[in-house]
Amino acid sequence: MLPENFSIAAMRAEEVPLLAGLAAAEGWNPGLADVDIAWDVDPGAFIALRRGDELAGGGTIVSYDGQFGFMGLFIVRPEFRGSGLGGVLWRHRLERLRQRLRPGASIGMDGVFAMVPFYQRGGFELAWRDLRFEGVAHGVTDPGAIPLSHMPFEEVERYDRAHVPAPRSRFLSRWIHQPGALSIGLRERGVLVGYGVARPCLSGYKLGPVFADRLDLAERIIGSLLASIQGRPVQIDVPEANPAAVALARRLSLSEAFGCARMYHGIAPSLPVERIFGVTSFEFG
Ligand SMILES: CC(C)(COP(=O)(O)OP(=O)(O)OC[C@H]1O[C@@H](n2cnc3c(N)ncnc32)[C@H](O)[C@@H]1OP(=O)(O)O)[C@@H](O)C(=O)NCCC(=O)NCCS
C-alpha cells in the first residue's frame, strides 16, 4: 500500500532524464545514451513512483522479446527512502514485468550487495558477482580489429545471441551504433570470434559488452578499445565467475571499485560465462 498522494504508473518521456539524473547522483556513471536507447527500444519498461505529479523514484523492467526480463535503475529519491516506498515499487515492478513476459520466463538483475537479502526474499537467487574495475585507459590497437559498422549486422547479432538469454536485435543495433561509441570485432578464418563496445559515460567510458571465444581475443579487443580512449577514465563490469576475465582486468592495471550481485528469478539462463569478459550494463543486462 502506498501512502496518500503517492502513485506508481508508466513513466512519461520527460521523467526519463530525471531517472538518469538520480542514477548519476548514486555514482552509477550511466552511459550518455543508455536511458535513451532503453526508452526507444522498450518505453513500457520505465516505471515511475510519483508524489503528486513529482517523480519520487523509479526503475526499469525491460522485456527482451517476452522471453527474458531485466530489472534495473531501482531508485527512490533520498528524501523518501526508508519508509517502505521502495519495497512497494519493487514488488509492483516485478509483478508488472512478469505480466510482460511469457509464463515461466526468467528475470535477471544486478543488485547492490547490501540488498541481496531483500531480493532473495523476493524470489531471486544469486548467480555470481559482477565486479566493476576502473582505471586509466592504456592499450594498443590490434590491426585485425574491424569496426562493427563494417560488418553485416546479422553477423554481430548471431554472435551476440550466443552470449545473452534472449534476442535483443533492436537494443543491440542501437547500442553498438550509439554516438561516440567504438564498437569492434575480430574474425578468424572469416568468422566473428569476439566483439566489444566502448561507450561514453558521464565520467569517461565503459566497456561493455566484451564477448570473446578466448582470452587472447578478449585481450586484443579490450586493448583496441582502450587504445581508442587512451588516457581517459574507463570502467568494465566483469563476471567474477570468469576468473580469466578478472585476472585480465587486473593485468590492465584496473582496480576493483564497486560490484553487484547478478541474480535471477526463475531458472538461471545457461550463459557461456567463460566467454563474457564484460557485461553489457548493470541496468539492462
Ligand atoms: C534501494 C532503494 C530504492 C530502496 O528504497 P526505500 O524506499 O528506502 O525502500 P524500503 O524502505 O521500502 O525498503 C525496501 C527494502 O530494502 C531494504 N533496504 C533498503 N536499503 C537498504 C540498504 N542500504 N541495505 C540493505 N537493505 C536495504 C529494506 O530493509 C527493505 O527490506 P524489507 O522490506 O524486506 O524490510 C533506495 O534505498 C535507493 O534508492 N537506494 C539507492 C539506489 C540503490 O542502491 N538502488 C538499489 C540498486 S540494486
Image: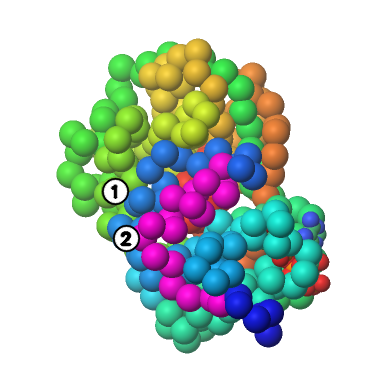
Q: Is residue 9 magenta?
A: yes
The magenta segment is 7-24
| Ligand 1 quarter of the rendering | bottom right
Q: Residue 271: x and y, percent?
A: 52, 58
How many residues crowd around disc 2 within 10 Å: few (fewer than 14), some, or many (20 or more)? some
- The answer to whether residue 159 shows anywhere in this view is no
Q: Earlier in the sequence, mark 1 or mark 2?
A: 2
Residue 80 relative to residue 177: left or right: right
Q: How is the image coloured?
A: rainbow
Quadrant of res 132: top right
Total label count? 2
- For marks 1 and 2, give the CA distance: 8 Å
Q: Residue 95: x and y, percent?
A: 56, 81
What element does badge 2 sit on?
helix
The secondary structure that dominates the magenta segment is: helix
Q: Measured along the vertical axis of the image, is residue 179 above or below residue 26?
A: above
Q: Identify residue for label 1.
A: 174
- The answer to whether residue 32 shows anywhere in this view is yes
Q: Quadrant of the N terminus?
A: bottom right
How many residues crowd around disc 1 within 10 Å: few (fewer than 14), some, or many (20 or more)? some
Q: Please name the residue shown 50% across and 18% down the image.
A: 232
Q: Is there a contact, CB below 8 Å, between mark 1 and mark 2?
A: yes
Q: Residue 281: x and y, percent?
A: 51, 48
Quadrant of res 197: top left
Q: Identify residue for label 2.
A: 41
What element does badge 1 sit on?
helix
Q: Is residue 235 magenta?
A: no
Q: Please name the residue shown 44% across and 58% down the image.
A: 15
